[in-house]
Image (spheres, rainbow, N blue to C red):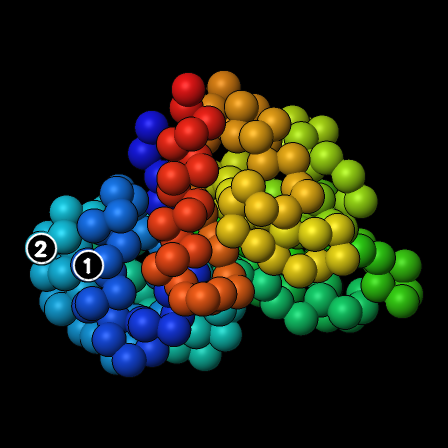
Amino acid sequence: MEYGLQLYSVRDITKDNFEDAVRKVAALGYKFVETAGFFDRTAEQFNALMEETGLRLSGTHTGLKALVEDYENTLAFHKAIGNKYYIIPGHSLKNQAEIDDFVEKVNDLQPKLAAEGITLAYHNHREFVPNPDGTVPMEQIALRTNLKLEVDTYWAFVGLKGNPIPYLERVKDRLIYVHMKDGSPDGHGTPLGMGDAPVAEVYEWVKAHNIPMVVESETCTPDGITEAKICIEYLKSLEN
């Protein structure tokens, strides 16, 4: 089995030494990475780092704002690094007006990016929880857009107040990746195997459906690399 890491997991290092963080991630045995910013590195510098470490880029977490405000340069950078999945890592969707604005923008951008060989996707956090006006962002994203999905299984567990597998089953044809994450029902994250989310059960479902797994562990306790190590060792233990 191969696993990826969302580099937000090691943000305690990336903010000061992006290259060192990526090298340490590769040394742990991760095979691909999902970025959470490039820290002013050029496309050439990033590509060289991927070649040096032998890691693959699975996708980026990049906000919608970059596409809306600077489409040409944003597109050029992502094409230069060979990115195939532009994943929006959340957006302000607090009411119907904000949802409508988001839907309009992504429905305009999605086919343009597709024509360039880039898939536009969305990564959830608390969008399963109804807004004060009763709207449920994830439901409208599913019904009103063609966005692919990267389901964060921990936040789905929290927002849906239970096992996220029925939701994964429902949207499996739109899944590009699954975020493997753990934590408590009240929204406190932990490394894999140390929380209350049904990680082992989710792992079996994801494995059976051959969907790439991206680890995210976000508390940096005691540090990001330690958490990333705990996570990959836990996943390897599930292989047997």
Residue 23 numbered tag: 1
Quarter that holds the N terminus: top left
Task: Assign a secondary structure to mark 2.
Answer: helix
Q: Residue at x 26, y 43 (%)?
A: 29
Left or right: residue 169 versus residue 120 is: right
Q: Which of 106 and 90 is in front in this view?
A: 90
Q: Position of residue 64 (x, y in %)?
A: 51, 68
Q: Residue at x 65, y 27 (%)?
A: 169
Does 234 appear above or below 141? above
At label 1, which amino acid type do we have?
A: Arg
Q: What element carries label 1?
A: helix
Image coordinates of residue 154 in percent, x first then y, are: 63, 47
Measured from the top left, where is residue 147 in percent x and y?
55, 47
Which quadrant of the view contains residue 223? bottom left
Quarter that holds the C terminus: top left
* Tag in front: 1 or 2: 1
CB under 8 Å between discs 1 and 2: yes
Q: Which residue is drawn at 66% across and 60% down?
A: 188
If you read the primary sequence from the N terminus, does the residue marked by circle 1 or circle 2 appear first?
A: 1
Few, some or many residues within 10 Å of mark 2 (<14, 14–19, 20+): few
Front residue (pair 144, 225) = 225
Do we see residue 92 in this rendering? yes
- Compared with 186, 97 (above or below) is below
Question: As rendered, which of 195 and 114 lies closer to the eye?
Answer: 195
Q: Distance between the residues labelled 1 and 2?
A: 9 Å
The residue to which callout 2 is attached is: 52
